[in-house]
Structure formats: C-alpha cells, structure tokens
Amino acid sequence: MNSPTARAGDHVSDPSNVLPRRRWWTAPRLRIAAAAAACVVGLALGPPGGWLVERVAFEGATETDVPSLRHLADLRNGTTMWGVDLDAVERGVERHPWVREAHARREWPDTVVVEIVEHHAAALLHDGGRLLVVSDEGRPFLPADARHLDLPHLTGFAGELGALHPDLPSLAVRQALWLVSELDERGLVLRDQISEISFSRSSGYRVHAGPAEIAFGLHDLPTQITRLAEIVAGGLSLSSPQSVDLGAPSVVLVRPLQSASSSGS
C-alpha cells in the first residue's frame, strides 16, 4: 500500500537530519578536565620530598661571600618552596654590609635565587680614629681593610661638621664624590690619580691629584669645573706641582708648589 502523498504546507520530520544536542561533558572534555585536576593536585601535593628547597643561588655577589649570604637568608633544611618567605629572605640578605639591595624569587622545582646589588666602594672616609669605606652614594658602610687603601681618602668631613648638623657630613661627602667623578669623566684628573680630598667648612674642597692641588669653593661646583676645563684647554698642566685655586668668583689663582725633592735639597 502506497504511503499518502504529502500535501503542500505539511511538515515532514526526517530523523536522519536531526543531530543530537552536544553536551560540554562529552568524553574528550571529561578526560581533559580530569587531567587538569590531576595536575593541580600534583602541584599541591608535590613529589615525595614535598617540593623542598634544594639549592639557594646568589647572583651578582662579588664582594660578598656565599656562606655569609646563606646564613643571612636563613633558609633552613626542610623548607618547602611554598613555605619560603621571599621578603624575609631579602631583608636577611640586606643585613650584609656589602649588600645594597636583594631580590629573591623561586625557580621551580627546587631553587631559590637571590639577586644581589652590592655597594660600589668609592672612597675612604676618615672619621675620628676610624677608616670607613664609602659607597658611590656617599654612605659609609664598612670598615676599611688593605684592599681599599688605593681609594681617595676623604678628610675633614666629620667632627665639628657633624656637630653643626647631622646631614652636613653626608652632603659634603656626596659633593666630594661628585668632584671625583666629574674630574675623571671630563678627562681633567683621572680617578686613580686622586689621593685625597680634604674639606673645610670655611674654604671648601682641596683635591690632591698627583703633584697638583686643586681648591674648589663651597658654591657652584659645576661652574668651577668648567673654568678648570677652560684653563686646562688653554695650556695649564695638572701633571706639574702647582696649586690651582678656583674658589674666587672671577679669577683663577695658579702658583707653583715646591716639589718634595726640591724641599729636601
């Protein structure tokens, strides 16, 4: 018996054209979700050792010794990677006199890395009976030893200057270090030729550079440096024993100094 003929307007449902509604929990997605959950659990639980800190690495440490840094970092045996207090590690390492800054981070699976920024030794400060290493920021941070004796010596920066105001010695030291850096960078006097910078609160700075001495007044040091550069370009030699006084506002006073050999003759 023939099936009835479909009339216009009738809706015909073809089961072969009806797709099943997809669900997000299909088997492949379930497997991916299960794998992700397993990874999270694995990271939380860790290996049998519990993600223990096996190594502490210090980067940038040249003046500091690693045993001292490890002691100050205070990462004891049995510390887990999750249990490391990075801020406490940084604070501990920064207690070392050579360390200016410390930055700690985790490197999985078992290492803590501490990046060290050390002070740069720039000069030796005579402070009463003490001889202290001064950083390029003007901060005394360490008693000096034989390794630092070739650095420029800073004299006259303590005592009554500190009694006038506690910030004055630090300010004067920073200006003295600026002089050292500026003289070196402009090729006027090399850093390793400067043996001493003495300070007087009435007259200013006196730079002892080989056989020459250069006196700077207390005010407008950049202008005085420029005047020195001009007279050096004009033929003045700082390799001969002479005194150059730049403290006067309008003139430069140059006079010969008696050398050590002639003074002894």
Image (tube, rainbow, N blue to C red):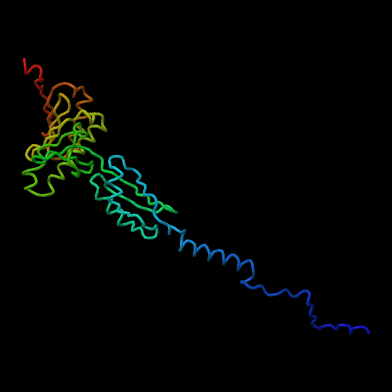
Q: Is residue 25 left or right of residue 12?
A: left
Q: Position of residue 197 (x, y in %)?
A: 14, 34
The image quadrant that residue 143 belongs to is top left
The image quadrant that residue 142 belongs to is top left
Q: Nearer the viewer, residue 54 or 239?
A: 54
In the depicted structure, whether residue 39 falls above or below residue 257:
below
Q: Residue furthest front?
A: 48
Residue located at (38% from left, 49% from top): 55
Quadrant housing the N terminus: bottom right
Q: Is residue 104 left or right of residue 39?
A: left
Q: Position of residue 202 (x, y in %)?
A: 6, 39
Q: Nearer the viewer, residue 214 or 38?
A: 38
Q: Position of residue 74 (x, y in %)?
A: 30, 53
Q: Nearer the viewer, residue 233 or 244?
A: 244
Tell how many labels: 0
Residue located at (31% from left, 40% from top): 62
Q: Residue furthest top?
A: 265
Q: Residue furthest right?
A: 1
In the depicted structure, whether residue 184 falls above or below residue 37:
above
Q: Position of residue 196 (x, y in %)?
A: 15, 32
Quadrant housing the C terminus: top left
